[in-house]
Amino acid sequence: QVQLVESGGGLVQPGGSLRLSCAASGTIFSIYAMGWYRQAPGKQRELVARISSAGSTDYADSVKGRFTISRDNAKNTLYLQMNSLKLEDTAVYYCNAILGGRPYFSWGQGTQVTVSS
């Protein structure tokens, strides 16, 4: 049974920073491309950052230059460093493996990020 557990969210002012973590268990984490997704109220879930098994990264235009995705295969953990946060970054953030361009495992509970002054 694969389990994805996201953490690190919280309330932050515009311009602030947060670091999200995603702990994966029950699978061989290192073989998968991984991604961070987010879902804002009333909107569809969207992919904001992904990292290949080899470590190459890609970002949505909305977060490029502000967010950094990374992974520690030894710890089975995915990270998202979020800097210069904006009001529109408010959402529940989820991680997942990406296979065939789609999220692969069942979703975890996510972690809430709220950007507010």
Image: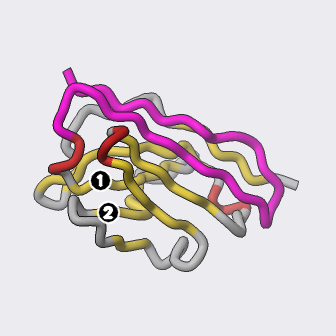
Instruction: Please state if 40 lies on the left or on the right of 29 as rendered.
Output: right
Q: Residue 80: x and y, percent?
A: 51, 55
Q: What's under tag 1, amino acid-wise? A: Met
What residue is shown at x 39% (from left), y 42% (from top)?
Answer: 77
For the residue labelled by badge 2, is the local secondary structure a helix, a strand or a loop?
strand
Residue that carries the numbered disc 2 in the rendered image: 51
**Residue 107 magenta-drawn?**
no
| Side of 91 where 107 appears, left or right | left
Of labels 1 and 2, earlier in sequence is: 1
> Which residue: 35% across, 32% down?
4
**In the rendered image, which quarter contains the N terminus?**
top left
Find the distance from the CA under tag 1 to the CA under tag 2.
Answer: 5 Å
* Farthest-out residue, right: 117
What residue is at 49 percent from the left and 49 percent from the top?
A: 39
Instruction: Evaluate if marks 1 and 2 touch, with contact meaning CB atoms under 8 Å apart.
Output: yes
Residue 69 image offset from top left, x and y in percent: 45, 61
3 above or below 67? above
Image height of 58 relative to 43, above or below: below
Tell me the SS state at disc 1: strand
Q: Is residue 86 above or below residue 30?
A: below
| Magenta segment | 1-28
| Front residue (pair 77, 47) | 77
